[in-house]
Image: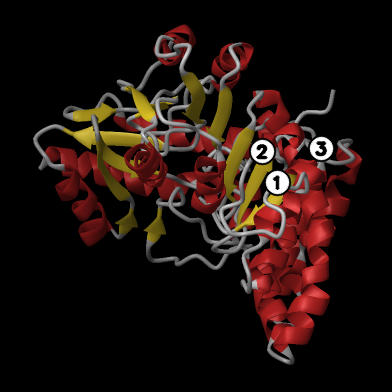
């Protein structure tokens, strides 16, 4: 059975062919220096082709060349990719190229040329997601996709929804708006993270299921700390009881290896400008085929009860250049390889976390185990506020992170990406050590 971790034409002999398609670093816009960088990247790709995935995740020469595909600042160390990731040069140049084309005659090139590229793009996203193109809508971010679901579900007064206090604020706000306006009932799980017991997580959700439960909202990866939840196990129980399953995949798509249907949810929303490194303001909605008819679109459609997934794309004028450049981000993702990418990012999280976990006063709030953690890490320092640690990292060391204070979660979140090297993380470890000693 095909899995998300299996790349298209999975045999490794096709690796370089995919890489060659992505190396737009050598475009005329990039100049001689970028062509040289492309040659170097091609060299390490050849070497990687003879290595196992586990070997390449520790090959710093390979990842240093991946870094050259980005235009990140050499002075500010960006470790807040969980908010929004920079995209590689090939994606940046695609956005600029499509935007220049659009400005030659907007209504012609946008609506008659670029808009025609949505169907091939839909098919490519579906291939990445492991589902039918007729279950994928292209949106601008996870919030738009998930609020389409939240406000489109047919719920009545007294219907219950199970969710967690640690879910993303925009989703909680949307559910609470329905609670206030329509009288639905929200029942909350309160997760004490990190949790390294799958059965305990499942129990906390399913213990709240009652005959009135209509929906369970599950965040695949808790964005605050990187906790990965056992979505499939919760979804199996929920669907067996006739409960619809909404999955917030804002941080999992493009990071973890999975096929969306294998999660057994009914609805899934994600941002593509995080771990897929697609253009800013790009996202995706998945709706199980048989659920499309009864889900109302967020924006008015000619037939709100249509079975066509495209009813969820009635957004009016939008940035077609950003949308079309998602294709280059997919190419870049496959160039690295889904399994290689997931393992590298987990390795990077553990690399810095294992070097600070035993330091006096430093507390880690993220699991090091791959089934419960991912690229995202959270730590705190006893005796210092979150703002003090976050501020010191940037003001003194020019390391950009983000402070988290939400429900029972407090700490500084660290999120590297594929362009982050272990040398970068040594800089972080040294900074944490010095801040903890002051």
Q: Which mark is residue 42?
A: none
Residue mark closest to the camera, 3 vs 1: 1
Q: Please state the total of marks drawn on the protein image.
A: 3
Q: Residue 19: x percent and y percent?
A: 80, 54
Percent from the top left, x then y, of residue 90?
69, 67
For image coordinates 74% across by 91% down, the residue present is 105
Q: CA distance from mark 3 to mark 2?
A: 50 Å
* Mark 2 vs mark 1, CA separation in Å: 6 Å
Q: Quadrant of the N terminus?
A: top right
Q: Residues within 10 Å of mark 1 (few under 14, many from 20)?
A: some
Circle number at residue 50: 3
Q: Position of residue 336 (x, y in %)?
A: 71, 46
Can residue 335 be seen in the rendering of this structure? Answer: no
Q: Dot 2 corresponds to which residue? A: 294
Foreground residue, 276 or 432?
276
Marks 3 and 1, the one that precedes in the sequence: 3
**Sequence-first tag of 3 and 2:** 3
Residue that carries the numbered disc 1 in the rendered image: 305
Report which quarter residue 340 is drawn in: top right
């Amino acid at each position: 059975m095909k899995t998300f971790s299996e790349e298209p034409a999975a045999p490794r002999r096709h690796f370089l062919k995919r890489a060659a398609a992505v190396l737009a670093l050598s475009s005329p816009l990039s100049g001689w220096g970028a062509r040289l960088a492309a040659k170097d990247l091609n060299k390490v790709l050849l070497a990687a082709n003879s290595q196992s995935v586990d070997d390449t995740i520790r090959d710093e020469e390979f990842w240093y060349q991946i870094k050259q595909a980005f235009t990140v600042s050499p002075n500010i160390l960006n470790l807040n990719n969980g908010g929004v990731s920079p995209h590689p040069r090939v994606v940046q140049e695609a956005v600029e190229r499509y935007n220049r084309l659009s400005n030659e005659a907007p209504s012609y090139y946008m609506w008659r040329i670029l808009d025609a590229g949505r169907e091939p793009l839909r098919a490519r996203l579906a291939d990445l997601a492991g589902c039918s193109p007729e279950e994928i809508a292209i949106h601008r971010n996870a919030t738009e996709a998930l609020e389409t679901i939240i406000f489109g579900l047919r719920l009545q007064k007294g219907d219950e929804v199970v969710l967690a206090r640690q879910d993303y604020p925009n989703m909680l706000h949307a559910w609470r708006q329905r609670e206030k306006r329509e009288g639905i009932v929200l029942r909350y799980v309160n997760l004490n993270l990190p949790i390294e017991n799958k059965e305990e997580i499942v129990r906390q959700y399913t213990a709240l299921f009652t005959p009135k439960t209509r929906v369970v909202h599950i965040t695949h990866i808790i964005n605050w700390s990187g906790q990965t939840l056992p979505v499939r196990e919760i979804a199996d129980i929920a669907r067996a009881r006739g409960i619809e399953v909404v999955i917030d995949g804002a941080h999992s798509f493009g990071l973890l290896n999975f096929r969306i249907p294998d999660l057994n949810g009914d609805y899934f929303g994600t941002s593509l400008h995080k771990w897929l490194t697609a253009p800013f303001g790009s996202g995706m909605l998945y709706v199980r085929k048989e659920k499309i008819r009864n889900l109302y679109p967020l924006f008015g459609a000619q037939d709100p009860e249509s079975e066509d997934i495209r009813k969820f794309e009635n957004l009016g004028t939008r940035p077609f250049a950003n949308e079309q450049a998602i294709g280059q981000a997919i190419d870049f993702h496959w160039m690295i390889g889904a399994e290689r990418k997931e393992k590298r990012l987990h390795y990077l999280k553990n690399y810095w976390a294992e070097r600070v976990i035993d330091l006096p006063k430093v507390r880690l709030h993220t699991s090091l185990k791959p089934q419960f953690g991912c690229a995202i890490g959270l730590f705190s320092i006893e005796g210092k506020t979150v703002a003090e640690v976050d501020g010191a990292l940037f003001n003194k060391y020019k390391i950009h992170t983000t402070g988290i204070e939400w429900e029972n979660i407090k700490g500084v979140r660290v999120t590297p990406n594929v362009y982050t090297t272990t040398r970068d993380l040594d800089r972080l470890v040294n900074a944490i050590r010095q801040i903890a000693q002051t």
